[in-house]
Image (cartoon, rainbow, N blue to C red):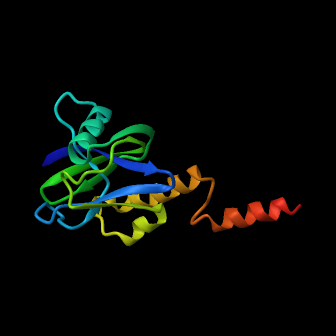
Amino acid sequence: MKRIEAAIALVRRGDKILVCRRKSDDTFGGFWEFPGGKCEDGETLEQCLARELREELAITVRTVARLTTVEHHYPQVLLRLHPFVCDHVEGDVQHLECQASAWINPPMLRDYRFPPANESLIEEAIAWFARAAGLSGDGQADTIRRAASAGD
């Protein structure tokens, strides 16, 4: 079975995360995804990520954290996704290899249709961004706790 190693970026700008819509003639056309792509021979995951984001979106990022590698078995290929949380550094997103993009609040990831390989990553990403913002879940419980503590 063919094996693909892909580096993908969960790019954040402020409290938003970037998602891109696949071109309609691609595999999983019209689905949403995190930008990134296949590693080339001799390339590190971080080099791959930087190259793919330049080629696909004309942006530069800074890696902040690495999330859990996802292995997904499609009928003809074993896909290994290596997700990185990144901060947007420079460049306006250009749709060079996607048909659309959006900066969304992380809990909204559940409202977008992603390829099957991304299912477990969506929940991990939402939890990571909530922790990074000092929140749990949708943030409401921590907000209530902080407000209650301020009154003590």
Residue 50, how many percent across, how many down?
29, 36
Q: Residue at x 51, y 55 (%)?
A: 15
The residue at the point 28 percent across, 32 percent down is 47
**Spot occupied by residue 112 in the image (x, y as percentages of width and height):** 35, 69
Of residues 3 and 9, which is closer to you in this image?
9
**Could you tell whether 6 is left or right of 2 in the image?**
right
Residue 54, quarter of the rendered image: top left
Q: Quadrant of the C terminus?
A: bottom right
For this orientation, the residue located farthest to the top is: 42
Up the image or down, 41 lies above or below 124; here it is: above
Residue 83 in the image, given as x and y percentages of width and height: 36, 46
Residue 55: x %, y % from top left: 20, 42
Q: Height in image: 62 above or below 18?
A: above
* Residue under the point 45% across and 61% down: 123
Relative to the observer, which residue lies in front, 69 or 127?
Answer: 127
Residue 142 visible: yes
Residue for point 19% across, 59% down? 74
